[in-house]
Image (cartoon, rainbow, N blue to C red):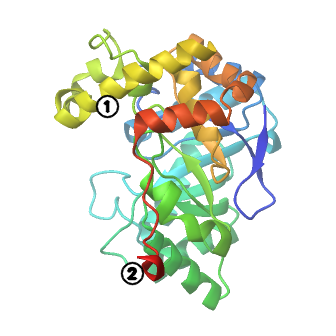
Amino acid sequence: MEYRFLGRSGLKVSALSFGSWVTFGEQVDTDLAYNQMKTAYDAGVNFFDNAEAYEMGKSETIMGQVIKKAEWKRSDLVLSTKIFWGGEGENDQGLSFKHIKEGTEASLRRLQTDYVDLIFCHRPDKFTPVEETVWAMNQMINEGKALYWGTSEWSADQIRKAYDFARENHLRPPLMEQPEYNMFKRDKVEKEFSALYEDIGLGTTIWSPLASGLLTGKYNDGIPEGSRLDLEKYSWLRKKLLESEEGKAKLRKVANLAAVSDEIGVPMPQLALAWCLNNENVSTVITGASTVEQVEQNMKTMDILDKVDEGVMSKIEEILDNKPKEDIDWRRN
């Protein structure tokens, strides 16, 4: 396993990490979760990602039970949660001081830990002043309930506003962002955040590196029974990925990418993960799985990174044809 610094901090996270979105509590019970997390841990994974919203807390409960059963040393783990959707009550959602405090404490109880290493604002909250959110996150750190805080699916402007307020008021600024990033979703990580990596030392813990399974190639010939897109609750995702014209165009590109993966002898999921890891601004790639075998295959990505060299990356770029456009140099146009 390779370990990377999380942004401009001294914290190291495994280049491949393990997340529980969709699977824990839906497709994965505690016994299977134990085997999956142990497989990832044995491969060198130290970062395990979660959120209060995942299966309305059940995902955190399962992860907490696994960690207790495994008896891993707490200092060997980097645990996260994300706060925003905590329930149906009037103050159980959003990024108010009240919900951040109560949501964090509830997550800690479910995870059976005194603190999380990383705590994320799961989405921006247009109703709560960013100043209140920054103060609340700083307080969670002061109380020892979290060590670092960051954002998920915030814009560059929103992150910078929070960062500037924190610095001006001697508070802990956001350190990391958790954006969606894969071969089909590139603009935010590769362009919008480009100045933040150098200016504020932003780290990234990217999610959906396989584009919800699209980049595994398993949907090229239909929807396998029991897969994520076979679940009724994800019918919206199925329509978006497979039934729209945009989705069909992506599937055609996946077929061409499969030819590249065959040429270099690398399975499609590993090719997609390696592509993400080749971005130096990616701190860690969050992987998910519904079986132990998928975890094992994902972890093998670290063994084939040298095969996804500049030549292969160029071939992929030709197929994707979606590299974010550079800003126009008006002095030369």
Q: Is residue 24 above or below residue 54?
A: above
User: Are the residues at dot 1 and dot 2 in contact (C-beta closer than 8 Å)?
Assistant: no
Q: Residue furthest front?
A: 332
Drawn side of residue 215 relative to residue 305, left or right: left
Disc 1 vs disc 2: which is toward the camera?
1
List the residue tagged with mark 2.
129
Question: Which disc, if any, is residue 113?
Answer: none
Q: What is the quadrant of the C terminus in the image? A: bottom left
Residue 113 percent location from the top left of the image: 67, 45
Q: Nearer the viewer, residue 76 or 177?
A: 177
Which three-letter amino acid code belongs to the residue tagged 1?
Lys
Q: Residue furthest bottom?
A: 168
Residue 315 percent location from the top left of the image: 53, 31
Residue 218 percent location from the top left of the image: 39, 15
List the residue tagged with mark 1.
250
Residue 147 percent location from the top left of the image: 70, 61
Where disc 2 sits, the SS reads loop
Q: Residues within 10 Å of mark 1 (few under 14, many from 20)?
A: some
Residue, x 50% and y 42% (percent of image)?
207
Residue, x 63% and y 32% (percent of image)?
311
Q: Is residue 95 above or below residue 115?
A: below
Q: Nearer the viewer, residue 96 or 191?
A: 191
- Between the residue at mark 1 and the residue at mark 2, the CA separation in whole angstroms equals 38 Å
How many numbered marks, from 0 up?
2
Where disc 1 sits, the SS reads helix
Residue, x 67% and y 24% (percent of image)?
301
Residue, x 34% and y 60% (percent of image)?
93
Sequence-wise, the earlier of marks 1 and 2 is 2
Q: What is the quadrant of the N terminus in the image? A: top right
Which three-letter amino acid code belongs to the residue tagged 2?
Pro
